[in-house]
Image (spheres, rainbow, N blue to C red):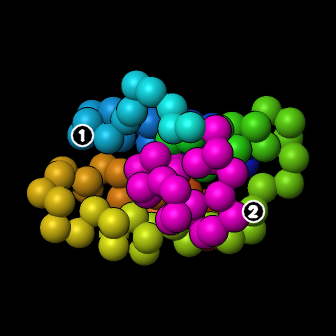
Amino acid sequence: MSHYHQVAALLIDLEAELRQIGCWDAVAPAPEALRSEQPFAVDTLNFQQWLQFVFIPKMHFLVAQQSSLPNACGITPMAETYFHGQQLPVTGVLTVLTQIDQLLAGND
C-alpha cells in the first residue's frame, strides 16, 4: 500500500474514532476561527475541532494532490493532554494518531 493510501486510511479511521466517542461536530466553526495562526488553533478551536476542521481536511488535500506530506507531526502528545481527564474512551483516537505520527516520521 502506498504512503498516501496509508495516510488516507488512517484519516478515515481517525474520523470514525472521533465520531464514535461523540467528538465530531455537525456544524463548522466560523471561518475566522479557522484562520488562526497559533499551533493547533488553540486560540479559536478546541483540539477535536482542530482535528476535524483543520488537520483532517488539510491531510486529505495533501493526499489527493499527492503533495509532500509533513515528515513530522507529533500530535499524539497534544491529544493526550487535551483528552486527559475527560472520561472519554479515547484509546482508539490515540492509537490512530500514534500511527499517523509514526507513518509521517517514517517509523511505519
Task: Tell whether 4 sits left or right of 7.
Answer: right
Q: Name the residue under label 1.
A: 21
Task: Indicate the secondary structure of the residue bearing disc 1.
Answer: loop
Residue 2 coordinates in the image, percent (x, y): 73, 42
Residue 71 visible at all: yes
* Quadrant the N terminus occupies: top right
Specify few, some or many for label 2: CA neighbours under 10 Å numbering under 14, 14-19, or 20 or more. Answer: few
Residue at the (42%, 55%) spot, across then down: 46
Q: Give the range drawn in magenta.
A: 31-51
* Quadrant the C terminus occupies: bottom right
Question: In which quarter of the view is residue 57 placed?
Answer: top right
Q: Name the residue under label 2.
A: 70
Residue 24 coordinates in the image, percent (x, y): 37, 35
Question: In which quarter of the view is residue 106 placed?
Answer: bottom right
Marks 1 and 2 sit apart, C-alpha to C-alpha, by: 27 Å
Nearest to viewer (mark 1 / mark 2): 1
Residue 9's label in the rendered image is none
Question: In which quarter of the view is residue 94 placed?
Answer: bottom left
Q: Please, what is the three-letter code of the amino acid marked with disc 1?
A: Ile
Residue 71 coordinates in the image, percent (x, y): 74, 68
The correct choice, above or below, for 30 with respect to 70 in the image is above
Residue at the (46%, 46%) spot, across then down: 49
Residue 101 visible at all: no
Residue at the (52%, 64%) spot, across then down: 43
